Image (spheres, rainbow, N blue to C red):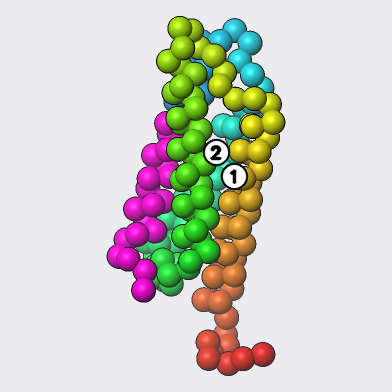
Amino acid sequence: MAEPFGLAVNVATVVDLFIKVGVQCSEYCAGVKAAPREVRSILNEVDRLGVTLGEVKRLLNGPNGPKVEASQNIRSCVEDCRLQLMLIVAKLHQGMEVRGLKWPFKKGEVASIIAKMERCRTSISLDLQIHQAYVLSPWPSNTSC
């Protein structure tokens, strides 16, 4: 059985990390003359992922929240997002500790991070669609194909 409010708390933590990533990326844009294009790419993917997690949060607060809460795949994807965002926040913070602002990511790293976030977002979206189709299905849940 899923722990009470576990997924909701994890979603809230991820949303908080989105804000931290946004603030730190904004500081890079303001502080570095030629801020890398990757800043915009990371922010765009974080925004898209935020919209998807907003949908998870909305469903968690709805009448079928316990069913969404029980989804191990959604839980796993949200945890993956949280870990990825924690990595981004730590790296960005590391780049700010240097004397001046220094972009801490290599080009291949940014592409890999964005690809992981895209996979998380796509997986969560697909799981939400399956969940909604199941909830809206006119067939009893105990029938098999």
Q: CA gap, disc 2 to disc 1?
A: 8 Å
Residue at the image position 49 percent from the left and 27 percent from the top: 91
Above or below: residue 5 compared with residue 27: below
Mark closest to the chain's N terminus, 2 or 1: 2
Q: Is residue 38 left or right of residue 83?
A: right
Tell me the crowding category of disc 2: few under 14, some 14 to 19, or many 20 or more residues within 10 angstroms, Cα based.
many
- The answer to whether marks 2 and 1 mark residues whose Cβ atoms lie closer than 8 Å is yes
Question: In the rendered image, is residue 138 in sight?
Answer: yes
Question: Disc 1 marks which residue?
Answer: 117
Amino acid type, callout 2: Val
Question: In the rendered image, is residue 50 in sight?
Answer: no
Residues shaded magenta: 1-22
Residue 68 falls in which quadrant of the image? bottom left
Q: Is residue 132 left or right of residue 16?
A: right
Quarter of the image with the N terminus in it? bottom left
Q: Position of residue 51 (x, y in %)?
A: 52, 46
Amino acid type, callout 1: Met
Residue lying at the far bottom in this picture: please name it.
143
